[in-house]
Image: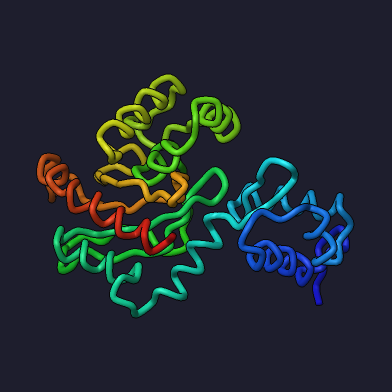
């Protein structure tokens, strides 16, 4: 089996993830290291990498629990075909709004599309794809994810990841981003005004766990010259309702 550069085999990394997932509650570093047959320093380093990608979440006292990425993957597998599955919620939303619908979950300082439902018979298709990653600061889903962070975490994110201009409309100022996030929290949904891609306007609603932690978002994407802004904003109630149902599915 191929091994990582420092001699830690991928099987032990998987054991580390499995040990966190099996516990059902935050687990001590020492117990995780023993389960994965790793030294505590190596286990601590790998858990740091997994935490950065939201596979695990670090808690006080050196304990770790499963993160939003694992929960999202679990939900995608176990809910498939059920009445309240991710697929059924997204398909229902797409039928109501007639536009392309996405579900994205956080992956470190970016997010990844985990579901996409095309917007019916339309002359234009979105370039997005399942598995594709996008920035947080200039997308509707990404900004929803940022609303789950406090001011210090948002500032640290802005310094770490940068606020690169993707279009002339991209928010590139930390202060402007902070103000935008306050507005999103107040109204319950985010808007991407051609900030990530020219001629594409999106709205998204955050998806939060029972503990209030935002793990991702659901969005409706439109082509600006096909759908008027007011018409898209009128879909926000359907969007927020779908986000609430998805939060229940993801747990």
Q: Residue at x 31, y 70 (%)?
A: 84
Quadrant for the C terminus, please: bottom left
Residue sitting nearer the eye, 135 or 38: 38
- Does 159 sit left or right of 112 as displayed? right
Residue 151 % position (x, y): 49, 26
How many numbered tags mark residues here?
0
Q: Residue furthest top?
A: 175
Residue 140 % position (x, y): 34, 43
Identify the image quadrant of residue 62: top right
Q: Residue furthest bottom?
A: 81
Q: Residue at x 26, y 65 (%)?
A: 118
- Does 26 sit left or right of 151 as displayed? right
Q: Residue at x 15, y 68 (%)?
A: 121
Residue sitting nearer the eye, 250 or 133: 250
Whether residue 152 is situated above or below residue 95 in the rendered picture: above
Whether residue 164 is situated above or below residue 93 in the rendered picture: above
Residue 246 % position (x, y): 34, 59
Q: How is the image coloured?
A: rainbow
Q: Residue at x 46, y 23 (%)?
A: 174
Residue 89 % position (x, y): 27, 66
Whether residue 236 is situated above or below residue 31 in the rendered picture: above
Whether residue 93 is situated above or below residue 192 in the rendered picture: below
Quadrant for the N terminus, please: bottom right
């Amino acid at each position: 089996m191929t091994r990582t550069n420092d001699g830690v085999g991928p099987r032990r990394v998987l054991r580390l993830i499995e040990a966190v997932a099996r516990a059902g509650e935050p687990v001590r570093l020492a117990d995780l290291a023993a389960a994965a047959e790793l030294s505590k320093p190596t286990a601590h380093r790998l858990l740091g990498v997994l935490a950065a990608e939201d596979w695990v979440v670090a808690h006080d006292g050196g304990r770790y629990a499963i993160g939003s990425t694992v929960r999202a993957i679990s939900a995608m597998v176990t809910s498939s075909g059920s009445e309240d599955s991710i697929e059924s919620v997204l398909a229902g939303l797409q039928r109501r709004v007639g536009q392309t619908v996405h579900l994205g979950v956080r992956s470190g300082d970016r997010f990844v599309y985990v579901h996409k439902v095309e917007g019916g018979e339309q002359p234009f298709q979105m370039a997005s794809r399942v598995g594709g990653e996008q920035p947080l600061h200039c997308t509707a889903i990404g900004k929803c994810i940022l609303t789950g962070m406090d001011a210090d975490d948002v500032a640290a994110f802005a310094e770490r990841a940068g606020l690169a201009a993707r279009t002339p409309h991209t928010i590139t100022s930390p202060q402007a981003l902070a103000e935008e996030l306050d507005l999103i929290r107040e109204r319950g949904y985010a808007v991407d005004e051609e900030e990530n891609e020219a001629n594409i306007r999106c709205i998204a609603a955050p998806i939060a766990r029972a503990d209030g932690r935002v793990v991702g978002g659901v969005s409706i994407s439109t082509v600006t010259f096909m759908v008027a802004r007011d018409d898209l904003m009128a879909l926000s109630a359907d969007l927020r309702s779908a986000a609430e149902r998805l939060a229940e599915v993801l747990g």
